[in-house]
Amino acid sequence: MISEISLLYGVGVAYLAVLFFIAHATEKGWLPDGWVHHPLIYTLSLGVYATSWSFYGSVGFAMTEGYQFLTIYLGVTLAFLLAPLLLAPLLRLVREYQLTSLADLFAFRYRSQWTGVIVTLFMLAGILPYIALQIKAVTESVSVLTRQEPPHLLALGFCATLTLFAILFGARHITPREKHQGLVVAIAFESAVKLLALLAVGGFALFGVFGGFGELNAWLTAHPEALEALYAPVQEGPWMTLMVLAFAAAFLLPRQFHMTFVENMDPRALQMATWAFPLFLLLLNLPIPLILWAGQATALDVAPDYYVLGLPVAADQSWLALFTFIGGISAASAMMIVTTLALAAMCLNHLILPAHYRQQALPRTNLYGWLLWGRRVLILLIIGLGYGFYWLLEFNQGLAQIGLISFVAVAQFLPGILGLLFWPRANRVGFIAGLTGGILVWLLALIVPLIHDSGLPMVDINLMVWMGAGEDNRWAFATFWSLTLNSLLFVAGALLTRPTPEELEAAQNCRREQLTPSRLLGDGEMRSVEQLRANLSQVIGPQTAALEIQRALTDLKLDGSERRPSELRRLRARLERNLSGLMGPLLARMIMDNRLEVPPQTQVALADSLRFVEEQLEHSTGRLKGLAAELDTLRRYHRQVLHELPLGVCSIAPGGDILIWNNTMAAISGMSSSFAVGQTLDGLKDPWDGVLRTFINGDDRHLYKLQLTVDGRQRRLNLHKAAIESAGLGSSVAHGLGGMVVLVEDLTELHNLESEVAHNDRLASIGRLAAGVAHEIGNPLTGIASLAQNLRYEKDPAEVELTASQILEQTRRINDIVQSLITFSHAGEVPRPRPAPVNMRTCVAEAIHLVQLSDSSREIDCLNEVPDNLIARGHAQRLLQVFVNLINNALQASRPGDRIIIRGDYILGSVALQVEDEGSGIPESMLDRIFEPFFTTKPAGEGTGLGLSVVYSIIQDHGGTVYADTPPGGGTCFHIRLPALEEELDSSLAKNAR
């Protein structure tokens, strides 16, 4: 039999070294990635729940409490069955906001520094007995193996060794945002070891002691009291109390919270854990009755807690005894390593760092190193306190069932957790009041009597006796009254006081499927990443600030030149969350608010809210059910319609951020939606920054035919705007919804098409004028030929000179006709000249001259009564086409002998012209449609219906108006209004004044 304590110590150290090697190999990537990230590894890591109390003490617990020992694991099963309602939301919060402990979670929800302080101190006090229990179990297991009292230095040596390994496992370097993959794999390995060890001892009990199932049944038949002892306590004992305690411990114990939430590498792994972890616990407890019965059958002379070791020792099975001892070492060491890591992070974030920050004493040169050494020192102190508690137990016996003390303590956080997840009205006053009341009952009902019974000087206060419950089970009494008082004070405190705005914001974050994006930065908003880095460096030092900002930029896939306000807000929010993982949520919020000039009460940026909601809903399709899924489908449809709309859509928040920039707007502007959304107008490329700002700040709701040069291309645009009022809109994401929507209509292609149609119409007019042109040119050509024939016979120099001048005059006449046709055919082609003064009488005269080239105009008089001083601002060639089309239409509607009169004047600051004929007129029912493309009153084959459409388009381009009516005497009159040239208008007004 093994008798050398030094050998056992060496085996324990070697086993811890194996665990460390597994962790190191994982971090170095020596193990396959598929193994490391397999959900089964995560599930096994949760086996840290089974400590020395489970490994050794379950048999003793079954001895006294019967089958009630299973309630400790049935409560855990219940907690994991409720994972979608309970564990999954907590995991989401921990991952999203980088919370590293239960104290961080409560401080995040119940915004108070005292929240973190009280939770940390109470958790530390409640877990120290549990740490002492692990030390006690290891030393007593050595005593069972060696059959002698272990030296007192053994416990101290075990604690020192465990301190070293705890530092190696979790405090070699600061990784606030990374998972300790090596730790997870190592804990999974130790869970497998202790499961195999218990199963091996159970198998030995079944086959080595009883000889098989038949012999076991025979023994139970011969000893019915063995079964009755297991069933009797279930009928009388506090099984419901134990279920509640185990339910709370399943995810609120520091080690369970750390492995379940903080070290979770993939949220999907929790789905497997909901059934695989209860299965693991079931397998772990299957051997317990067998080991208990085998110990009773062999009449072991050791305490029932150590039957697991006593059976192989009594049977002289050295290898099994050693393997079982390793399983016990594994259970104790895993619990102490993970627990001390979690408690050290809590103490650092909520006790040490806030005190230093208030004194402005945070190190600015190497914050990471300072935090690292602080965590190491705290690990040493926590294990030292656990050893001190063990020393107290060692020399002052009387503390029994130590594990339940910690379970009752942890159960005090249940009301706070339920309020955190399901009650938005819950606040820090209620939480602190309730927790304080629960702690008071816990102290008076459990701690004070036990310390008094252990022999230490302590006032004999027995709450059970005071309340007349002396015969009740003390665990049921303490659990019931502590949770009752806790819950009552929690509810009363929350109802009597109002939650702060920060608590309401945190309550929204904690509700299921709801997260709140970053807040506005306020008037002191950061304008660049460098400014952000400079301000942050004042608190945590330039090196740490640079590293943290670079990490945040990498997370968000941004670069250091980012200046968009929305992206800087996202960067600030990511920084706050990263710092939360480094030093806790409260201190991170204090640093960001105080140093980055954020007012304590500020609203959420609407642009960030909408984008954040969009991002969350993009990944929520599988989780939405019923009406929520239908609403999301409708939202996606409307969003798709908006983005595929053939009009450019730009929505601007009240703060000036761009909320919507659809696909058409991106095509028109040359700026993608990902670039534009979140920008202010100042951040847009030229010319859009000035155009949109001017239009939004202007009084006009519409802007027609705006000419812009975008990426070297001329564009014609119509702009429309509308204000969005916030009345009637919800305010769950932001206060003061509203802003402006700008619609951008791209008329470039339409304008080019109209120009082409107008040009084709001119060519058609030239075709119609072809016969008249030929006749008009023929006359001067005949005259030139006659003069040239006569010229050869002329001898008189004076006659020769006269004939030559007549030939030149006829040539000029032909040239004028040709130039008029060329001018008319080329009118309106792009690029067009800038608007210039146009003498309307000259323009009308040239139009009449062109029209009269045709034969149809020879019997109709065209009278030009436009004043000589009537000057409009526009394009002469395009206005020429207007009058050619209108006079042509008038000629076609007139009869021989009719007159066409063109008049003009200055009226109300503009140039007014009328083209009136005495023809057949236009029916009044058709007057509203005559400017539509392809609409004509002529018989089929005699008109295209484009002439008046071209007239309307040209006048609109000039900023004028055109309409037609029927005068009382018959015929048709077209009325045209054009912008006047300012100088001529002023001169005309002055002349009229005289």
Image: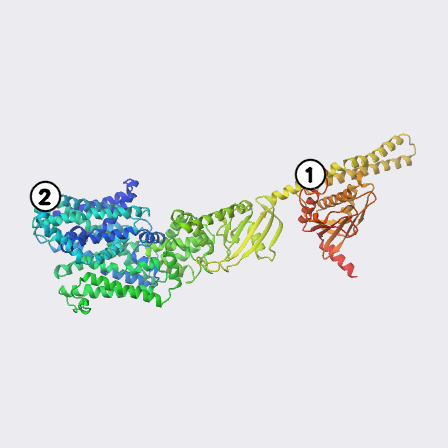
Q: How many marks?
A: 2
Residue 736 in the image, given as x and y percentages of width and height: 48, 60
Earlier-in-chain disc, 1 versus 2 = 2
Marks 1 and 2, how far apart in space?
110 Å
Which of the pair 937/337 is nearer the observer? 937
> In the rendered image, is residue 588 in sight?
yes
Residue 217 in the image, given as x and y percentages of width and height: 11, 45
Q: What residue type is labelled 2?
A: Glu
Q: Do the residues labelled 1 and 2 touch (CB within 8 Å)?
A: no
User: Which disc number belongs to residue 760?
Assistant: 1
The quadrant the N terminus occupies is top left
User: Which disc number belongs to residue 573?
Assistant: none
Please name the residue that numbered disc 2 is placed on.
215
Residue 686 in the image, given as x and y percentages of width and height: 56, 49
Which of the pair 731/766 is nearer the observer? 731
Around disc 1, counting alpha carbons within 10 Å, would you say few (fewer than 14), some (14 to 19), or many (20 or more)?
Answer: some
User: Which SS class for mark 2?
Assistant: helix
Residue situated furthest right in the rendering: 796
Q: Which amino acid does label 1 sit on?
A: Asn
Around disc 2, counting alpha carbons within 10 Å, would you say few (fewer than 14), some (14 to 19), or many (20 or more)?
Answer: some
